[in-house]
Image (cartoon, helix red, strand yellow):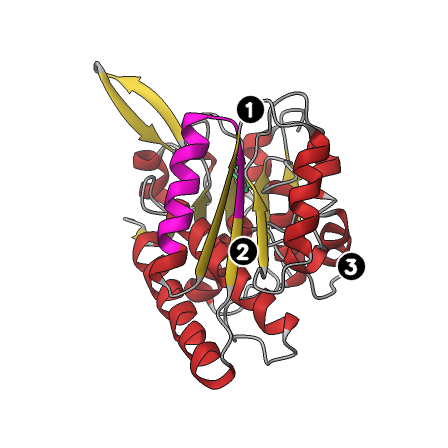
Amino acid sequence: MAANIIDGKAFAATVREKVAGHVTRLKEEHDITPGLAVVLVGEDPASQVYVRSKGKQTVEVGMNSFEHKLDAETSEADLLALIDKLNNDPTVHGILVQLPLPKHLDEDLVINSIAPEKDVDGFHISNVGLLGTGQKSMVPCTPLGCLMMLRDYHGSLSGMDAVVIGRSNIVGKPMAQLLLGDSCTVTIAHSRTKDLPEVVRRADIVVAAVGRPEMVPGDWIKEGATVIDVGINRIERDGKNKLVGDVDFASCAERAGAITPVPGGVGPMTIACLLANTVTACCRANNLAEPEGLTA
Ligand code: GUN
């Protein structure tokens, strides 16, 4: 069976269109423009690319983008002072501090200094706790994007067996919480899991988020399962640089019912969900109805 391809690039475009519609409504009916502040410390090349892309897409959907680029030697006190200023700025509805931070800065301390209601990454300890207890929170962008694609493809996820491979705070753990929230039976697998192939073979939904190129082969996939590949791994093959996921696309696509490609699957959904979270945060800050279909 040839799998259906879940086109994340096209889906992300529909999310951005919805966001842009809400932004127009906020401007016209309430004279409010949602604003996203992105803080980058240092010159990490990958982070610079992401931050540029976030700023560009923020402006494209009609929101205000505030970029704060600080040098690599910025002190923790100066960074915390900037976050405090953004926390208290009513034109800023979302704050994102690009990770990783330089080694001398305490990432947990910095993230937990962001006002939880402006924490559009969903990394603040309050948002983690709210998500874990099924309460309204800001939800991390990548797992939110995966959930949106799964809901769009399946409708209800209720009763499905889901296996999340990877237990990171950014993807694996929140993904598992979201699937549980949609009434899946959830297993989180990781490097110490016994008989990983057998665990994965039970799954109706496989979310691979380990950061190891093509580690899931097709014969681990149950016939007809849905495979969501979060991995973005740069490898060299036949003398060329190539982007591959955490699953072996060719063999998994032969058994899966549906699969996300890399590139063009989960990747584009992450920034689209960041924009969605910013508009959600803006609506909540102004006691307005939340946009439907853009939250968990
Ligand atoms: N670095 C890599 N991915 C992310 C992300 O989703 N959010 C932030 N803040 N930093 C990142």
Q: Residues within 10 Å of mark 2 (few under 14, many from 20)?
A: many
Tell me the residue that label 2 is attached to.
Answer: 144
**Start-end of magenta stretch:** 38-57
Q: Amino acid at mark 1?
A: Ala
Q: Residues within 10 Å of mark 3 (few under 14, many from 20)?
A: few
Mark sitting on residue 72: 1
In space, the residues marked 1 and 2 are separated at their CA atoms by 31 Å
Kindly report the secondary structure that dominates the magenta region of the rendered protein: helix
Q: Secondary structure at mark 2?
A: helix
Tally of marks? 3
Q: Amino acid at mark 2?
A: Leu
Residue depicted at 45% across the width and 75% down the height: 22
Q: Secondary structure at mark 3?
A: loop
Q: Is residue 17 magenta?
A: no
Residue 28 higher or lower than 262, as above or below: below
Horizontal placement of 238 versus 126: left or right? left
Residue depicted at 66% across the width and 29% down the height: 193
| Residue 207 location (% of width, % of height) | 52, 44
- Of marks 1 and 2, the one in the foreground: 1
Q: Amino acid at mark 3?
A: Thr
First in sequence, mark 3 or 2: give its number.
3
Residue 112 higher or lower than 289, as above or below: above
Horizontal placement of 176 versus 9: left or right? right
Tell me the residue that label 3 is attached to.
Answer: 133
| Residue 85 location (% of width, % of height) | 67, 51
Q: From this viewpoint, which residue is outermost toward the top?
A: 239
